[in-house]
Each structure stands twice: as structure tokens, then as C-alpha cells.
Amino acid sequence: MRGLHVENLSMVYDLPDGGAVEALRDVSFDLEAGEMLAVLGPSGCGKTTLLNIVAGLLRPTSGQLSLTVGKDGGEASHPITGPSPERGMVFQQGALFEWMSVAENIGFGPRMKGARAAATAQRVEELLDTVGLRGFGDKAVYELSGGMQQRVALARCLANDPELILMDEPLGALDALTREKMQGLVLNLWHETGKTIVLITHSVEEALFLGQRLFVMAPRPGRIEREYRLDFARQGLNGDSREIKASAEFTRMREEILAMIWEMEEEIMGRPGEEA
């Protein structure tokens, strides 16, 4: 099966005082090619650690993971042991090169892979159109708003044509209105490109709206507490996002997940009125 395969993944951080923190324990799941997975949970549940392991930025203490891709009419499974162009990353802050123009930022990956200048320029123009930034290619990064910078970051990721896109709170630093608009952009990009996406977020509403699948993770140790399979993303492709988010089913699920996460937070921090 094409997609991401994670088996019995565990991660333990050793501390300077000789102690240890178990960030993840026996996390296993399969994500089919073209699916969008949203991951949320309280602070310390290991969701960013999980994303960094999938990105190849961290080596797990135990377990294995791989990405199966289409190749030469068949399939090839590639173990994940480090960073790879097959996996693209979009961070909370755009992490753009401020000394480069918007177009130069987007075309950076293809240039590093030795793509022809004409082909790169054409691809950059296509992506500028895709993310709604036509005419901004010559602009400096610092001239753009936060939302526009995140559009550049998405385009730069897509320029490398990764099999899997990893998003670490990509909309978390945006104002509420811009965040709503960017959710629609992410949804449309997922639909138009058919990419597999893993989205880390602290927003229950965002996770419900964008995730075909949703993992709620529990902390100490980090693990998948509950999985949901959702239809709101499909509805959002043709419907009004505010109507969907105001629907009875969306509201019910949002409150259910908020209560679950709040209960986890209270177990960690203590309930109000309890003595330490």
C-alpha cells in the first residue's frame, strides 16, 4: 500500500541529570497515499516529536517507519532514516530566505536539484498562481504579510513535488481571519495535488475541519488515545466553511474532543482547587 507506515515507534529523551522523558510509546499507524491526517493533543503529548521523526530530523529510540511510493509502474518502500526530498516540511514560521525574492525562495529546491532554469521559472509561476500570489514573484519576503509568507512556504514545499507534506502548526501564528482563509487554501491544495499530508495543530476546530483522519494524542508517554475518521474536509471542498463549523455534528465533536483534552490537561496540571 502506498503511503506512510509507522510501527511500534518509541522515543525516550535522556536528561542531563540522568533521568529520562518518554515522549512516545509504541505508536503505530498506516496512512494511505492522498489522505490528510490531523494530529492534536495537550502540550507534551509528543505530536511534534512524531512529526520530526517522520521528517527524518530525529532518530527514534525504537520502532521503524517507511514511505511507500509509486515507482516505475510499481511500488517501492523507503525506510525513513533521515531527511529526504520525498518528505516536505512546512513550519509554523515560514523559515524563508529573507535575502531572496519570493520566486527565488519557491524555486530554491528545484535549483538545488539541478533543474533547468526555464523549467524552474515555469514551475514557480504555476505555483504562484496556485497559492494566490500571481504578480508577487519579484517581491522581497519582508514585504509580505504573515499569511502571504505562509503561502510562499507552501509553494516552496510543493516545488519539490514531495510524496508526503508535513505541517507543524503552519497556521498557528496567523490572525483568526487569515487563518480561516489559509485553511481553505490548504484544503484546496490537498484536493488539487492529491498529496499525503500530516498536520500538527493545537486547534480542535482546525483539526476537525481539515483532517480526513484525526489522532488525539495523550501524554506521558505520548500515544494515540483516539482516532476519528471524518467527512468535514470533503464537505469543505464544496460547502461554506462557517456553516460546516456551525453544524450540530461539528459542534458535538468539537466539544467531545475539547473535553477529552481538558481532562488530560487536568491530569497533568491538577484540577482547580486541588492541593499540589
Image (tube, rainbow, N blue to C red):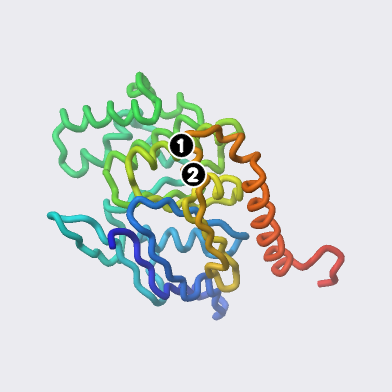
Q: Viewed as shown, does residue 262 lie left or right of 217?
A: right
- Give the residue drawn at x 47%, y 63%: 49
Nearest the viewer among 120 and 139 is: 120
Judging by the rendered image, the residue that carries numbered circle 2 is 233
Q: Quadrant of residue 18?
A: bottom right
* Residue positioned 39% across, 52% down in the render: 35
Q: From what the image shows, is residue 228 above or below residue 119?
A: below
Determine which residue is flagged by label 1: 237
Q: What element carries label 1?
A: helix
The reply to whether dot 1 and dot 2 touch (C-beta < 8 Å) is yes
The residue that appears at 19% across and 44% down in the rendered structure is 113
Q: Percent x, y for residue 125?
A: 28, 26
Quadrant placement of the N terminus: bottom left
From the viewer's perspective, is 111 left or right of 225?
Answer: left
Q: What residue type is labelled 1?
A: Leu
Report helix, strand or loop for mark 2. helix
Name the quadrant of the C terminus: bottom right
276 vs 4: above or below: below
Residue 140 appears left or right of 223: left
Residue 235, percent from left and from top: 50, 40
Residue type at tag 2: Ala
Q: How far apart are marks 1 and 2 (CA)?
A: 7 Å
Q: In this view, does 203 lie above or below 46?
A: above
Q: Where is residue 44 in the image (x, y as percent from the top left)?
A: 59, 64
What is the residue that sits farthest to the top in this orientation?
Answer: 135
The structure residue drawn at horizontal position 33% and vertical position 24%, both measured from the top left corner, is 137
